[in-house]
Amino acid sequence: MGEGVPLEADAVIVAAGAWTGEVCRPLGVELPVFPRRGQILHATLEGVDTAWWPIILPRMGPYLLGFPDSRVVVGATVEDVGFAPRVTVGGLDEVIEAGLRVAPGLASATVSETRVGLRPVYAPGSALIGPVTDRVVVATGLSAYGLTAGPFTGELAAALALGERPPIDLAPYRPPTG
């Protein structure tokens, strides 16, 4: 399969992040989705089982998320800078300082990686989960909650694409149609 080769499908899920608006525009659907940069830090706590740590997701401030292999993710910055996916010294400083306020024990952790992402934000507000045509479902606009809410959002979008009833009412997340 090459680029630009049409594929037949009963349904398609568009989960193109900050590019969702651009992907859906040819369908006659305008979705004001824009990028929000988020810088995150991966750290390792040698000898600590972080796989079952709870997700710390405060209303404001950093989130912490444990993974297998003694890895912890701390994030994230919230930056409206357009399509500029780069890690900055100031952004890392912000993440480290906020992470240490919430979990001072991370001071001895090893920095294993830094990452940056362009989170999709739906200009009017909440996430977008639902059909935009009879065969196209969108799932986007989670902003900084992609790591935590993304798997469940994928489940909801898959249910819609398969013609099944999702386990929650998606009316608050319904996208505008063209």
Image (spheres, helix red, strand yellow):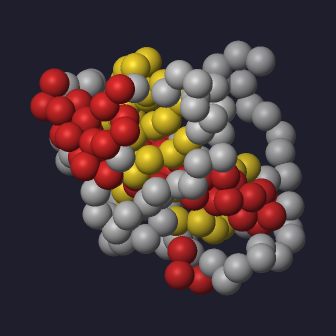
Q: Please report the residue visible at 53 percent of the width from the left and 81 percent of the height from the top.
A: 172
Q: Nearer the viewer, residue 91 or 31?
A: 91
Q: Please report the residue visible at 40 percent of the width from the left and 26 percent of the height from the top.
A: 109
Q: Is residue 102 visible?
A: yes
Quarter holding residue 100: top left
Give the mark count.
0
Q: Nearer the viewer, residue 119 or 164?
A: 119
Q: Quadrant of the N terminus?
A: top right
**Does 81 sit above or below residue 89?**
below
- The residue at the far left in this view is 90
Quarter holding residue 71: top right
Quarter holding residue 86: top left
Q: Nearer the viewer, residue 52 or 168?
A: 52
Q: Is residue 141 visible?
A: no
Q: Is residue 69 left or right of residue 80?
A: right
Q: Please report the residue visible at 16 percent of the width from the left and 24 percent of the height from the top.
A: 89
Q: Where is residue 73 shown, x and y percent of the image? A: 46, 37
Q: Where is residue 169 shown, x and y percent of the image? A: 67, 83
Q: Is residue 79 left or right of residue 6?
A: left
**Does 80 sit above or below residue 174?**
above
Q: Where is residue 170 shown, x and y percent of the image? A: 63, 78
Q: Please report the residue visible at 48 percent of the width from the left and 66 percent of the height from the top.
A: 127
